[in-house]
Amino acid sequence: MDLGLKGKVAIVGGASMGIGWGIARMLAREGARIVITARREPNLSEAAQKLRVETGAEIIPIAADCRRAADCARVVETTIARAGSIDILINNDGAPPLGDLVSFDDTAWAKAVEQNLMYVIRMARAVVPHMIAQKRGGAILNITAISAIQPIAGFGLSVATWGGVIGYAKTLSLEVAKHDINVNTICPGYIETTRLEKVFAADGSDPRVMRAKLEAEIPMNRIGSVDDVAAMVALLVSPRGRYTTGAAIAVDGGLFRGVR
C-alpha cells in the first residue's frame, strides 16, 4: 500500500536509537524526508548515516535537547530553513527515572514535566502555524507508553506527565481538525529497546526470568519490535490515516486490559 508519504517532511525526536530510529527508518522507506533529533551529536550523526545507507532518503540531523525551549524552537526553525516545510511531527524521547513516587523531589518532577509534557507542547506550538499556513494538512503524533493508560508501579513520573500529554493531544486535535491536521498518541507496550533492558534488570532478577515473565503477560506471547510501533505510526501520520485523530492507541500485543 502506498501511504502517500513521498516527499513529506517529518521531524522525528529521539531518533538516534530505539523506537525513534525505527520510526525514522519506516518513514524514510516510504519516501519521506526526515529530520532526526537527539541530545548526543555523535550518536545522532551515526544514526543519520546509517539511515541514509539503508533507505537512500534525505536525512537531516539536528542535535537538540528536547527539555530546552530554545532547542525546540531551533529544531523547527532549522527544519523550515533546510527542508522548506513541515508535514509530520513525531514527539518522542526517553523517559524519566523509575522509582517510588514519594521518593521524587520537586526537581525530579520539574525535569519530568520538561521532558515529557513541555517538550510536546513547545514542539506542537511551533509546528502548527507552519502546517496551517501550508494549507495541506499535517500530522502530529506523540510516543508515550502503555503505562500512560495502564499505570505501573515505579513508573509514576512518566504516568503522570504522559497523562498530561494525552489530555493535551486530545484537546489540540479538536482545535486543529478544521485544518486537516490530526493529533494522536501511541502507547507502546513492552518493546525491544534499551528502556526495556532496564526493566529486565530493575529488581536484580535474572534478565531471562524477567523477560519470560513479561512475555507471559502479553496475549501474543512476545515482546514487540520497534517496527511494530513504526508501522502504526506510519499509517497514522499518512494521508490514509488522517481521519483518525484525538486517539490514544496501545501497540502492545494485547497487554492493555481496559475496555474503552
Image: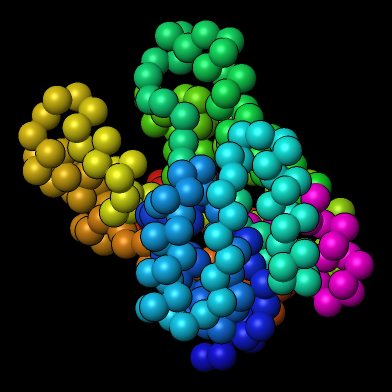
- 188 w.r.t. 229: above or below: above
In the image, taking residue 14 as reference, residue 178 lies left or right, namely right
The residue that appears at 51% across and 31% down in the rendered structure is: 159
Bounds of the magenta segment:
126-145
Magenta segment includes 130: yes
Magenta segment includes 230: no
Q: How is the image coloured?
A: rainbow
- 137 w.r.t. 189: above or below: below
> In x, y percent, where is residue 96?
47, 29
> In x, y percent, where is residue 114?
63, 30
- For residue 206, say whether it is visible: yes
Nearer to me, 44 or 28:
44
How many numbered markers are drawn? Answer: 0
Q: Can you tell which quarter of the image residue 61 is in?
A: bottom right
Nearer to me, 239 or 126:
126
The residue that appears at 89% across and 74% down in the rendered structure is: 135
> In x, y percent, where is residue 163?
60, 35
The residue that appears at 46% across and 44% down in the rendered structure is: 40
Nearer to me, 143 or 218:
143
> In x, y percent, where is residue 198?
27, 35
Q: Can you tell which quarter of the image residue 22 is in?
A: bottom left
- For residue 236, say whether it is visible: no
The residue that appears at 38% across and 69% down in the rendered structure is: 50
- 122 w.r.t. 159: above or below: below
